[in-house]
Amino acid sequence: MVLRPAAFLLVFLACVSALSQAPDQSSAQSNPNLPRSFRDQDLNITYFYPGRFVPDPASVAVTPAAPASSSSTTTATPKCARSTFFANSVTPVDTSSFVLSTIDNSCPNVLRGATTLGPFIREQILRQLKQYGEPTVTQEPTRYTIDGHPAAIVLASVPMPATPGKIPQTTYAAKACFLGNIPVKAKKKSDPADPTRHVLCFDYTTLHSDLYHLLFAFSLQFDNDTPQPVVPGSVIR
């Protein structure tokens, strides 16, 4: 698969720069060619996403994080991860969606596992796709940074169960997670290190592998810094 995101990303980031100081555009825009935005007030992060995606806040069940009953991330993560935003894009030929979630220190064991990024993301994306069938990892964990924040991404796919009278379909998924803060190592052994307080995750699914290119249209802004791509084109092979 050959992807050419550079030109599109430059145009997108130019639009993002113009919108970065504006109020939340998540429900105000109707033009699918313009980016919308979602502001996470708690973490002071603004996400920008393609206008073709329609927010669906009612589909995100926000519940208090429960104590982890096990050190296994597979069993504990659904109780400790908090979904913050969900949106989807439905067309006659495709359905794509994405969800943003946060793992915080209310479940220390889960947060500790999530900070490994690559192994955690791989385990989670396979667990999430198993509800549809037997998934396959199509790109193993790839590490990169987002404005200095360590990040990683995994790509996977799963064939959907055959339905009489319909063409067999495959669900394609990407999961990227990154550290919410940049841990600072202690200068002295006696000084405590700055721990990771949050791990943020971005899940994307689509029914067409060609729509992986939409990943490059997602961006985020820490505080008032310059917007950065959630998934740089160089990390997708």
Image (cartoon, rainbow, N blue to C red):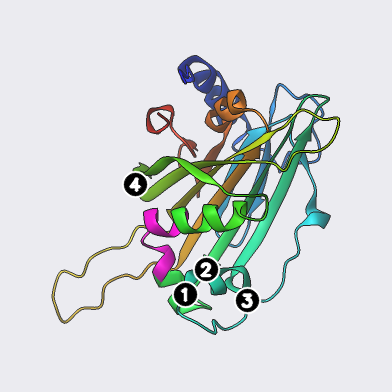
Q: Residue furthest front?
A: 164
Horizontal arrangement in the rendering, residue 198 relative to residue 35 (left or right): left
Tell me the tag on residue 65. Answer: 3
Q: CA distance from mark 2 to mark 1?
A: 5 Å
Give the CA separation, mark 1 to mark 4.
Answer: 28 Å
* Residue at 54%, 81% in the rendered image: 68
Query: x, y (%) of residue 57?
Result: 79, 53
The amino acid type of the residue labelled 4 equals Gly
Which mark is first along the chain, 1 or 3? 3
Query: Which element carries disc 4, helix, strand or loop?
Result: loop
Secondary structure of the residue carrying numbered label 3: loop
Q: Earlier in the sequence, mark 2 or mark 4?
A: 2
User: In the drawing, what numbered circle is on residue 72?
Assistant: 1
Please name the residue that numbered disc 2 is placed on: 74
Please, which residue is most extreme toward the right here? 165
Residue 180 visible in the current orientation: no
Residue 41's place in the image compared with 10, above or below, is below
Residue range corresponding to the magenta coloring: 113-121
Q: Residue at x 44, y 68 (%)?
A: 197
Quick one: 62 or 21, which is closer to the camera?
A: 62
Q: Residues within 10 Å of mark 4 (few under 14, many from 20)?
A: few
What label sits on residue 148 in the rendered view? 4
The local secondary structure at tag 2 comes to helix
- The rendered magenta stretch, by its main secondary structure, is classed as helix
Badge 4 or badge 3: first in the primary sequence: 3
Q: Earlier in the sequence, mark 3 or mark 2?
A: 3
In the rendered image, which quarter is residue 35 located in? top right
In percent of width and height, residue 56 lies at 80, 48
Labels in figure, total: 4
* Tag in front: 2 or 4: 2
Give neighbour class at mark 2: few <14, some 14-19, many 20+ (Cα, 10 Å): some
Q: Amino acid at mark 2?
A: Thr
